Image (spheres, grey):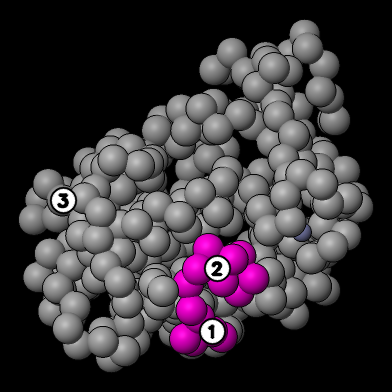
Amino acid sequence: VSSTGTERHGQNGTGADAIVPTSCAICGPDAAASQMYAANFSLADFTPTLFSARRLPDRIHFRMVRCDRCGLVRSDPVLRADVLAALYSQSTFDYGEELPNLRRTYRRYISRLRRLDDEQDALLEIGCGNGFVLEEAVALGYRRVAGVEPSSDAIQRADPMIRGQIVVDVMRNGLFQPRSFDAICLFQTFDHLPDPAAILDMCRTTLRDGGLLLLLNHDVNAFSARILGERSPIVDIEHTYLFSPKTMRELVEKQCFTVTAQGAVRNTVSVRYLTQLFPLPPGMKQMAGGLIDRARLGRLNLTLPLGNQYLIARNG
Ligand SMILES: [Zn+2]
């Protein structure tokens, strides 16, 4: 099923010229890298569906490499940034039944931000989807919230109170006034970015001095990722970089932030969703789902580490 042939084109006219090499976001283009997993896609796979949030994992990924110098894991080569942005702008958004639990989880990290500094008024979220985190931020006391999100489908699903605060775009220079926010957060967005160092630089200029940055995303060194290897759902075509606590900290510090907190995320999830996450064959998955439904356990919620990490850093 592996093909990089020029004769194959995706629905968006994705040709071989749309594939570009990457370099380590920490060490730059001079650092060598070693292959972890070979690519397993064909160019025909590049459709907006593939880049839609919360779709079930299909284990399609680019070639994955690890930097020999710092250990940062990345896809190489990847889609050109403009092609990627076009796919995300057409992608659809469906959080499904787990949205209330995502709210519970992310709300805990927004309130942790607030506890660090109660002088905060304005919060920006990059990759805000339908804006549910912005709703939580308002409920927690932020008086001004804003979001950036490339998927217009996601924004159409936003609460009317929030929709006007969301810019349909990818984060770029000039979207917001310098030093106009007290906090910037990225939930499951940082590892999708084609150039995370450039986005951190934009965060630095968009935050006031002493403003707070919150990143929450996968941990490539988490237990689940290490035992599943290439079968882990995080080895995915949507992820340009996969960070460990060490590489995430290094990149953030290189961009002149001071890390103030870092750790494993405890996600609140339903038992039903948890069974969907396991890499079981479809038949077994259905059987497990049936058993759980009969035992009326599906809607039971658990809060546990699921292989995500968070980092909070201060500007300056
Ligand atoms: Zn490196």
Q: Would residue 233 be found to the left or right of residue 290 on screen?
A: right
- In 3D space, how far apart are the residues under numbered discs 1 and 3 (Cα atoms)? 29 Å
Q: Residue at x 70, y 26 (%)?
A: 19
Mark 2 sits on what residue?
A: 252
Query: Does residue 20 lie above or below 223 as drawn?
Result: above
Mark 3 sits on what residue?
A: 165
* Element on which disc 2 rests: helix
> Where residue 137 appears, x then y in whole percent?
21, 72
CB at mark 1 closer than 8 A to ligand 1? no
Say which of marks 3 and 2 sits in front: 2
- Graded by Cα atoms within 10 Å as few (under 14), some (14 to 19) or many (20 or more), the crowding at tag 3 reads some
The residue segment tinted magenta is 249-263
Query: Does residue 293 lie above or below 241 as drawn?
Result: below
Mark 1 sits on what residue?
A: 262
Q: Residue at x 10, y 51 (%)?
A: 160
* Element on which disc 1 rests: strand
Please tell me which of labels 1 and 2 falls first in the chain. 2
Front residue of this view, candidates 255 and 127: 255
Mark carried by residue 74: none
Residue farthest to the top, as pictured:
7
Say which of marks 1 and 2 sits in front: 2
Q: Amino acid at mark 3?
A: Gln
Q: Is residue 299 magenta?
A: no
CB at mark 2 closer than 8 A to ligand 1? no
Front residue of this view, candidates 279 and 120: 120
- Graded by Cα atoms within 10 Å as few (under 14), some (14 to 19) or many (20 or more), the crowding at tag 2 reads many
Q: Amino acid at mark 2?
A: Val
> Where residue 164 appears, x then y in whole percent?
12, 46
Residue 253 falls in image quadrant: bottom right
